[in-house]
Image (cartoon, coloured by chain):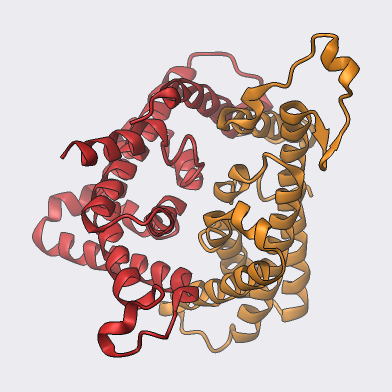
Amino acid sequence: MGENPISIHVLGICSALAITTKIDTAVVMTIAVVAVLSISNVVISLLRNNIPNKVRIIIQMSVIASLVIIADQVLKAYMYDMSKLLGVFLGLIITNCIVLGRAEAYAMQNSPSKALLDGMGNGLGYGTILIAVAFFRELFGFGSIYGAQVITNQIYLGGYENNGLMILSPGAFFILGLIVWAHRAYTETSDKD
Amino acid sequence: MQHYINIIINSVFIENILLIYFLGMCSFLSISKKVETSIGLGLAVIFVLSITAPANWAINEYLLAEGALSWAGLGHINLDFLQFIVFISVIAAMVQLVEMLMDRFSPALYVNLGIFLPLITVNCSILGTSLFLVERDYNLAESTVFGFGSGLGFFLAIVSLATVRKRMRYSDVPSSLRGVGMAMLLTGLISMAFLGFSGISL
């Protein structure tokens, strides 16, 4: 957690933000990322002594892309509505810098069992942020948590309104910015500029 | 003609690939520290997108989509599950090709854009554009224009963030908010400005 891939290294936010308007899409995305990341780490770690250095990026890419295809097909088969909601963003796990980054930085040097743990850890770290962003956006944007309405009618009658900005893209940027701020203040890290 | 202009305006302002769909954020945040480099990356993205969008369109139309292989007498085969892996390989290959051609024919341009090209392969906006044009059923001309427009939108967004960040140097930001945190908040503000266009329907 101290080196959370999103808030410290700022990797992989491409696909992180678009699907965080509700918690359930964020949860499914997290599961997909954890699965792809841990399996790809294991596969690449198993292959690491047989991959020629020059073509390693291409090989890592094809391993990752194949795994994402499998994840996509599984989702289409068992959770068709959810796969419609995630749309192109599931495919974009391929270009998610975390997956390639971990493959390159960790799995190429370490044994499969360590790589599996590394993949799961990073995937869960990523998912934590994803779900945190989704929690705030759903709470303020729809007044609900994981689909259950928490802000009751009385509060709405008292003049409370859902904040529409949270559902739109700026809301995601603000919340992620604030989470990064809080996390860095807690771990006392900072950028130079 | 008007139709194509609409697609450009739509992809640059109303559905900006970066500010509305969050694609290409990784390089967006890391490259936007200097205005010059952000212009370089922006141009490289425009360039690669205008080439890969029609290329991936053609591959999808004639090789992958349902019934696409009917010209070879294989109409019953549907290969669209291969989309991701084929698209990403096409993008990687195209980037390599562009890099080599540039090196051979325009060394000056290569020196300026060269370092950004390898980064582009893993830029989500490139793959995202290819996936969007399949989802939206564009034809060849439309996808070329859409690729160019998305690139232009990326260029606009990254250059504006870089210029704003340049100004931020003079302000007193809390130490743990510096860098990425502040960049996210700024992006949120720019994105709010772009939302002003969202009421326009073309």
Residue that appears at 35% across and 65% down: B91
* Chain the render paints red: B
Foreground residue among A128 and A183 = A128
Residue B165 screen position, x and y as percent = 45, 24
Q: Can residue B34 be seen in this view?
A: no
Decide if residue B124 is on the left or right side of residue B39.
Answer: right
Query: Chain A is which colour?
Result: orange
Q: Which of B95 and B69 is in front in this view?
A: B69
Identity of the residue drawn at 71% across and 33% down: A137
**Residue occupying image coordinates x 67% and y 61%:** A33
Q: Extreme top residue here?
A: A159
Residue B68, quarter of the rendered image: bottom left
Q: Where is residue B61 in the image (x, y as percent from the top left)?
A: 31, 70
Q: Which of B143 and A62 is in front in this view?
A: B143
Q: Where is residue A118 in the image (x, y as percent from the top left)?
A: 74, 66
Please say whether residue A141 is visible from this viewpoint: yes
Instruction: Judge whether B103 appears above or below B185 on screen.
Output: below
**Viewed as shown, does residue B60 lie left or right of B109?**
right
